Amino acid sequence: MAATVELIAAPWNLGLRPPAPGREPGTWRAPQALLSAGLEARLRPDRVVELDRPPYAFDAQPATRIRNGVTLREQTLRLGEAVQAALAASRFAVVLGGDCSIVLGCLLGARRDGRCGLVHLDGHSDFRHPGNYDAGSSLGSAAGMDLALATGRGELLLTHWPTVGRPLVADEDVIQIGDREDGEAPPLTRFTAQEIQQLGVADLGERVISRLEQRGLDRVWLHLDLDVLDEHVLPAVDSPGRPGLDFPQLAELVATLVGTGRVVGLDLAIYDPERDPDGVYAAPIVDCLAAALTPLATVEAHA
Amino acid sequence: MKTLLADGPSALYATEMEQFGRLAGHWATTITYYPADGSPARRVSGEWEFGYALEGRAVLDVWQWPGREELPVTGRSPDQECGLCVRIWDPRLHLWRFTFHGTAHGDQVHMYARQIDDEIVMERAAGGDLVRWTFADITAGTFHWRNERSTDGGRTWRLDQEVDARRLR
């Protein structure tokens, strides 16, 4: 029996800094933009769950140096319940963000049924934590910290979770793909954007699968920050850059990973419709995701 | 103010309330401060009283130093502390929300707390540092509390203050 899809809309922007004083980031609009561009018709989900849009705070919240930290914890717990319910119903969860902080709720939901690895596709490492930057100088943005938080680095508020504890995922169970930044490399298995250019996507996919097999990871969550795409094909993100993948390469890589039957769900983050005033990028994102999830129609769900 | 205190935990979150609620009672404390400048440790006596409040949805405590045996006959001086801590279990966050209200120096502290293994860990971000207050080695008659600060994101911690507590009743 083929795996069926559950779409979960997580319309938030809590993990991003304001793009201008007094102005909220626009990623919260992405789920609706993608649904309006035909995503539901293309994926034909069994169920669509729409979480509420949380309020965005411009000022610091008490006892945390993470922007919207308290609200993020509450939303993470809610998203975790939604993902857990989808997986419990044997559905493939597709979470539409939102910014990269949604990966915490996704992992929380996936981890409640046991060990779950993380394949983190992102043009940045998202590995900021108080041990590698001056948290006192400005409020931190969780969308630049999500991998650090997921691996248990940072404030208790966003690193200790009910049932699961800390961390959401062990360093050894993470594969980071697509980082294009210079600087200190996180202590994780990683394939940088520059390495991917040399390897090619087919070879990259084989290496990732080999690593999953080596670690015995039967369950994996796939985080898909769309800024892993080259800014020439998708500039409508918070921090565009290059080099990066193009849409066919991204679809091929995701399809390869989903085709293993090990991926239990994915989240799609950081598309910002407010940076896409003509609405030209929602359709290729939908095309890409629909192509990437084609294997779900044919593969058995991995035990 | 008869509605402030409660005899026991609310049935709503009885398991969580017990985490701090088991400290209900009156404790004699020995408080040791470890100055960051390397000067010798300083020790004072104190008292710490815990109890349920707000229909059993909160655990309050009153933190005092010095203890009654060292209290001046003229009473507590203005710079000697008698502060109030309020702990409320927040089911939306699965965390305790904590505030301390000091009367001696006007201190106000917000923290979040959670039981981790057999300790209760409270934490706040203070500028670029993390500050943790941890209740450990809790038995019916004793517990240990420590106040630590990390300047490297939690990799290492410096002990600023600790408390040894012995139950009086």
Image: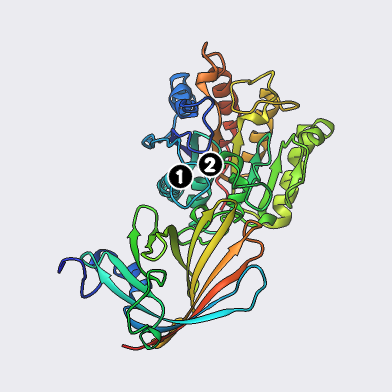
How dense is the environment of label 1, judged by Cα within 10 Å: few (below 14), some, or many (20 and up)? many
- Residue identified by numbered label 2: A101
Of pointers 1 and 2, the one earlier in the residue sequence: 1
Residue B58 relative to residue A117: left or right: left
- Residue identified by numbered label 1: A72
Badges 1 and 2: C-beta atoms under 8 Å apart? Answer: yes
Asked whether residue A297 appears in the rendered view, the answer is no
Numbered circles on residues, count: 2
Asked whether residue A109 appears in the rendered view, the answer is yes
Task: Point out the residue furthest to the left here.
Answer: B2
Residue A188 relative to residue B86: left or right: right
Residue B106 relative to residue A191: left or right: left
Coordinates of residue A153 in the picture (x, y in percent): 61, 55
Coordinates of residue A247 in the picture (x, y in percent): 66, 23
Q: In which quarter of the image is residue A127?
A: top right
Residue B46 relative to residue B149: left or right: left
Q: How far apart are marks 1 and 2 (CA)?
A: 8 Å
Coordinates of residue A55 in the picture (x, y in percent): 38, 36
Coordinates of residue B27 in the picture (x, y in percent): 37, 83
| Chain assignment, label 1 | A
- Which structural element holds mark 2? loop
Task: Point out the residue furthest to the front here.
Answer: B74
Residue type beneath disc 2: Ser
Q: Please report the residue visible at 44 percent of the width from the left and 45 percent of the height from the top.
A: A61
**Between A136 and A252, the one nearer to me in the picture:** A136
Q: How is the image coloured?
A: rainbow
- Which structural element holds mark 1? helix
Residue type beneath disc 1: Leu
Q: Please report the residue visible at 72 percent of the width from the left and 37 percent of the height from the top.
A: A179
Q: Quadrant of residue A284?
A: top right
| Chain assignment, label 2 | A
Residue A211, above or below B39: above
